[in-house]
Image (cartoon, rainbow, N blue to C red):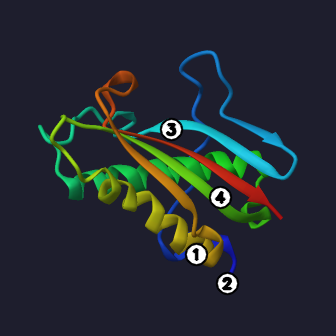
Amino acid sequence: MSVYDKLKELSITLPPVSVPAAAYVPYVQTGNLLFLSGHIARRDGKPWVAQFGRDISTEEGQQAARAVAIDLLGTLHAATDGNLNRIKRIVKLMSLVNSTGDFTEQHLVTNGASELMGQVFGDGGKHARSAFGVAQIPMGACVEIELIAELG
């Protein structure tokens, strides 16, 4: 089954590449690696503003991280000239989770993105990962995720 068949099965429509909010580009390719800039969680087209341990649950956070992963897939689609089948492997995700000092489930929030990559890319979606709790993310977003992918 192709990546696009999996996306259709999951009822996922790929979004266009987000316009950078500052002085950076959405992605850079070097050799056979693609580095995607951080993407923040959005809801209804606006930053999904919340802080874990204060006003958003881990389960809602998993949905926010999944939404970020869908945006990352849209950027991967653009970076591969519209051919996600060129992705050999998702190498690494790094997740920043806007958290209070006593919130300790950043890894569970990030599973929302990691699980989607596995569903879409199968074994090629299994990746290394870091999940950090941070005091704040740009625009108050609850989650920001960056990604490294290998082209085949």
Which residue is depicted at the point 44% across and 68% down? Answer: 115
- Going by the numbered disc 3, the residue's amino acid type is His
Foreground label between 3 and 2? 3
Residue placed under numbered mark 4 in the picture: 91
- Going by the numbered disc 4, the residue's amino acid type is Val
Mark 2 or mark 1: whose residue is earlier in sequence = 2
Mark 4 or mark 1: whose residue is earlier in sequence = 1
- Distance from label 4 to label 2 (Cα)? 21 Å
Residue 79 position in % (x across, y down)? 75, 46
Mark 3 or mark 2: whose residue is earlier in sequence = 2
Residue placed under numbered mark 2 in the picture: 1
Q: Are marks 3 and 4 in contact (CB under 8 Å)?
A: no
Within 10 Å of disc 1 (Cα), the crowding (few <14, some 14-19, many 20+) is: some
Residue placed under numbered mark 3 in the picture: 39
Is residue 38 positioned above or below 123 on the image? above
Residue placed under numbered mark 1 in the picture: 6
Which residue is depicted at the point 38% across and 55% down? Answer: 110
- Distance from label 3 to label 2 (Cα)? 27 Å
- Going by the numbered disc 2, the residue's amino acid type is Met
Q: Which mark is residue 101?
A: none
- Distance from label 4 to label 1 (Cα)? 19 Å
Among the 4 quarters of the image, the one containing residue 124: bottom right
Q: Is residue 26 left or right of residue 136?
A: right
Which residue is depicted at the point 38% across and 61% down? Answer: 111
Foreground label between 1 and 3? 3
- Distance from label 3 to label 4 (Cα)? 17 Å
Foreground label between 4 and 2? 4
Q: Secondary structure at mark 2?
A: loop
132 or 21, which is in the foreground? 132
- Going by the numbered disc 1, the residue's amino acid type is Lys
Q: Is residue 116 left or right of residue 32?
A: left
